Image (cartoon, helix red, strand yellow):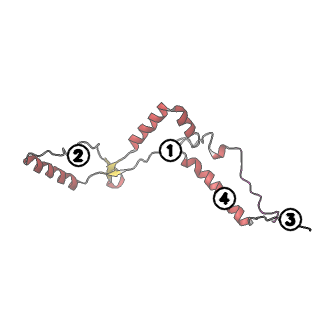
Amino acid sequence: MGGGSQKQETIYPEFGETLVQQGVGMGRDVATQQATYIPGFGPTVASLTPSDNAVAQSTDMMADAFGLPASGGQSYLPQEQVYDGGIRGYSSAPLEKQIVGQIQDAYPGFAEYTESFGMNPVSGEVGSRAPEMQPVELEMQGSGGRK
């Protein structure tokens, strides 16, 4: 009984190979940016409008008139910030910066390792573990020798 062997091979067309290479290249390019932490500087939460503040104040006055406890207004809130276009709100950036600083102080090895995948947002210098610092380049060879 004679038997032959069969070999099944999947061959990418050249255009598909090019698209995959471009996609991986773009992924490598944005990976460094995604690994770089930059807190948001815009408003995170909107502040109360002047109408909202007036309602809270009148509610407190009414509660006080009946001997009920008042809310104390918004004395517990930080000072609102005014952004471009007159948008009023609060930003989480100061708190985020504080937390990142605490992590860097408490766990410097972890912070350094994590930051080595990203880039310095001021200088643009990439970390030692960023994809562009790695010695391996992608090269596909699935075209089956066709040109």
Asked whether, in this view, residue 147 is left or right of residue 66, the answer is: right
Chain part drawn in magenta = 135-147
User: Which residue is under mark 2?
Assistant: 74
User: Which residue is under mark 3?
Assistant: 5
- Quarter residue 124 falls in: top right
Residue 143 location (% of width, % of height) = 78, 63
**How far apart are the alpha carbons under marks 3 and 2?**
80 Å
Name the amino acid, label 1: Tyr
| Other-residue count near label 1 (Cα within 10 Å), few / some / many at <14 / 14–19 / ≥20 | some
**How far apart are the alpha carbons under marks 4 and 3?**
36 Å
Q: Nearer the viewer, mark 3 or mark 1?
A: 3
Are the residues flagged by discs 1 and 4 in contact, CB closer than 8 Å? no
| Other-residue count near label 2 (Cα within 10 Å), few / some / many at <14 / 14–19 / ≥20 | few
Residue 27 location (% of width, % of height) = 61, 54
- Quarter residue 13 falls in: bottom right
User: Which residue is under mark 4?
Assistant: 22
Q: In the rendered view, tell whether residue 3 sits above or below residue 141.
A: below
Name the amino acid, label 2: Gln
Q: Residue at x 53, y 43 (%)?
A: 121
Asked whether, in this view, residue 147 is left or right of residue 78, the answer is: right
Are the residues flagged by discs 2 and 4 in contact, CB closer than 8 Å? no
Per the picture, the main secondary structure of the magenta-coloured stretch is loop
Looking at marks 1 and 2 on the same chain, the residue that comes earlier in the sequence is marked by 1
The quarter of the picture where the C terminus appears is: bottom right
Looking at marks 4 and 3 on the same chain, the residue that comes earlier in the sequence is marked by 3
